[in-house]
Amino acid sequence: QVQLQESGPGLVKPSQTLSLTCTVSGGSISSGGFYWSWIRQHPGKGLEWIGYIYYSGSTYYNPSLKSRVTMSVDTSKNQFSLSLSSVTAADTAVYYCARDHYNNGWYGLDYWGQGTLVTVSS
Amino acid sequence: EMVLTQSPATLSLSPGERATLSCRASQTVRSYLAWYQHKPGQAPRLLIYDASNRATGIPARFSGSGSATDFTLTISSLEPEDFAVYYCQQRDNWPITFGQGTRLEIK
C-alpha cells in the first residue's frame, strides 16, 4: 500500500521560504506514470493545485505561484520536496502531497498524505 | 484557467436519501474529471476518475456521469459516513483546478 507523509516546519516567518518534504513508502517514486504533486487548502477554503514533479525532474507549476515555487525529487530517498519563497500570511494553509496517476490515461490523484498545516507568522 | 463551479454549495439530506452533486466547467473537459471526498483532518479520497470510473475500493453507491461541461456525482443511498465535502477536479486544461466544493450535511 502506497503511503505519503509530509514533513517540515509548521511555522514560517513572513518573507522566508517554506520548505516541505514528502516521503513515499510502499512504492518507488521512480516508477513511470506518476506525477508527484503538491496541493494546498487555505483555512476554510477549497483545494488549490500548486504543481507536480516527475521522477526525471520535469516540473509543472501553477502559473499563479510559478515565480515563487521550486520542486525537487530525491529518488535515492524516495522523496520529493516543495519550496515556496517570499511567503506571506496568504500562504498559511494545509499542504498536501499526492500521487497523480497518469499512464496511458488518467487515474486521478489516487494517494494523498495526511496534510501538514503551515502557518506564516512572525 | 478553467473554472469548475459546484452546486449546491451545501446539500442537507438524511441517511438513505439520494444525493446529486453538480460540477460545471467553464470549458469543455474531454473526460479528465475526478471527484474527491474530504473529511476534516483527513486526506482527500479519490472516488471517481475519468468522469465515471470508480476508484479502487469505492462502494457502488457512488457513481459519476456527464461530459463536456456538465458532470454529476450521485450517491444512491446515503450512509452516515458519506457526510463530508466533495470536490471535482479537472486535468484537461492547465493549470489543474478544483471546484469550490459541495458540503453534504446531515438534515
Image (cartoon, rainbow, N blue to C red):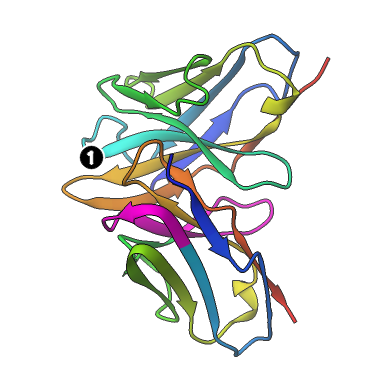
Residue at mark 1: chain? A
Residue that protrudes farthest toward the left in the picture: A104
The x and y percentages for residue A3 are 45, 44
Query: Which residue does the image show at 47% across and 77% down from the upper left?
Result: B74
The correct choice, above or below, for B92 with respect to A10 in the image is below
Q: Which residue is drawn at 70% across and 9% down?
A: A15
- Is residue B38 within the magenta segment? yes
Q: Is the magenta stretch mostly helix, strand or loop?
A: strand
Quarter of the image where one finds residue B14: bottom right
* Quadrant of the frame with the C terminus of chain A: top right
Q: Is residue A113 above or below residue B25?
A: above
Measured as percent of width and height from the top left, residue A99 is found at 39, 41
Residue A1 in view of the camera: no
Label 1, secondary structure: give it. loop
Is B94 placed left or right of A116 in the picture?
left
Q: Among all residues in the image, which is located at the extreme front?
A: B26
Residue at 39%, 46% (x, y): give it. Answer: A2
What residue is pinned by disc 1? A33
Residue B19 in sight in this render: yes
Image-quadrant location for residue B72: bottom left
Q: Give the range drawn in magenta.
A: B24-46
Residue B55, x across and y down, in percent: 36, 64
A41 relative to A31 in the view: left or right? right
Q: Residue furthest right?
A: A122
Outermost bottom residue: B16
Estimate how packed mark 1 is, as few (under 14), some (14 to 19) or many (20 or more) residues with alpha carbons within 10 Å.
some
Indicate the amino acid at tag 1.
Gly
Q: Where is residue B28 in the image (x, y as percent from the top left)?
A: 32, 55
Residue at coordinates 49% horizontally, 85% vertically from top-left? B76
* Residue B87 position (above or below residue A102): below
**Left or right: A43 in relation to A64:** right
